Image (spheres, rainbow, N blue to C red):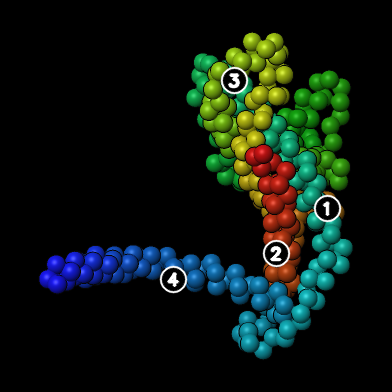
Amino acid sequence: MTVVTDRQSQAVRRKSPPGRPRRRITREAAAAWILVLPFVVLFLAFTAGPVLGSFGMSFTDIKQRDLRTPFSVNGVGFDNYVKALSDETFRKAAFNTAYFVIVGVPLTLVVALGAAVLLDRGIKRFQALFKVGYYLPVVTSIVAIAVIWRFVLSPDNGLLNTALGWVGIDGPNWLASKTWAMPSLIAMAVWRNFGSAMIIFLAGLQGIPESVEEAGQIDGAGPWQRFRYLILPLLRLTILFNCVTIGIGYLQFFEEPFVMTKGGPLDSTLSVSMYTYNQFGFGNYGLATSMAYILFVVIAVVTFIQFRLLREK
């Protein structure tokens, strides 16, 4: 009987953990919550709270005059969304944004990939200097970039029109032309942003084993065939990352037209973000927030499509 009792007591001791580890786990959990509490408070106060508040605003008729009495506004349901989608200027801004994205994203990816291949295969000396030079526009202020590009695109004494004049071509007023203003902003955006994508592509290229290309050479594949059928498939996830990040940024493009053209001429460079900003400036807070959430939904849908098309198979 004594033996059985001892065994039973030992089994009970194994099943029930001692009290000290429980207290230790509780103390560790409490310490963790104390450490994370400042972030949780800041996140709720400055991120989650404003996001939920703005979402609620999009269903009201709140304007600037209602800020003193925010609880006296009226709910309007989806009227702001209907008004935004039926607004001709908003549709024009949406078309401009789509144009900017459809042309700018592939062009940025191509230039970035070309620069990455050039640095990985062609340029061996002063490679670090070229990396810094290509990446420098990414960290440069948009105001400084705007000054440079205004000088380059100046219709009278700009560098571009001067160079075109050497071959007998009379260059247009780039930023004041409905035809050339958006392509000019796209060119500036590509020049400014391809450096970050180039760094990612370069890392992806340097992560591909040399044995892959050697196998292609043994099979008789040429340089383009090796790049097309061996290198590009291995860069699928790198392309996806760059496509998503650049696409999200270009869908929200604001600084380029705001600094360079103010949305003109005749709204030909007006973007959705800039039009939303203008509505906030006019005090139409309910309408502006509905436009912002329409843009959010578009970004989510485009990102989902990119993941579906470029995900690893």
Mark sitting earlier along the chain (3/2): 3
Q: Which of marks 2 and 1 is nearer the N terminus?
A: 1
Q: From mark 2 to mark 1, how far is it between C-alphas?
A: 16 Å
What residue is shown with label 1?
A: 95
Q: Depth-wise, is mark 4 or mark 2 nearer the camera?
A: 4
Residue count near mark 4 (Cα–Cα under 10 Å), binned few <14, some 14–19, many ≥20: few
Kindly tell me whether residue 313 is visible in this rendering: yes
Tell me: 290 left or right of 119: right
x and y, in percent, of residue 217 in the image: 65, 12
* Amino acid type at image mark 1: Phe
Judged from the image, the secondary structure of the residue bearing numbered disc 1 is helix
Q: Position of residue 254 (x, y in %)?
A: 69, 53
Report the amino acid beneath label 3.
Val
Disc 2: which residue: 292
In the image, what residue occupies the spot 19% across and 66% down?
Answer: 7
Rendered view: 136 above or below 81? above
Q: Which residue is drawn at 71% across and 24% down?
A: 228
Q: Which amino acid does label 2 sit on?
A: Ala
**Residue 41: mark in rendering:** 4
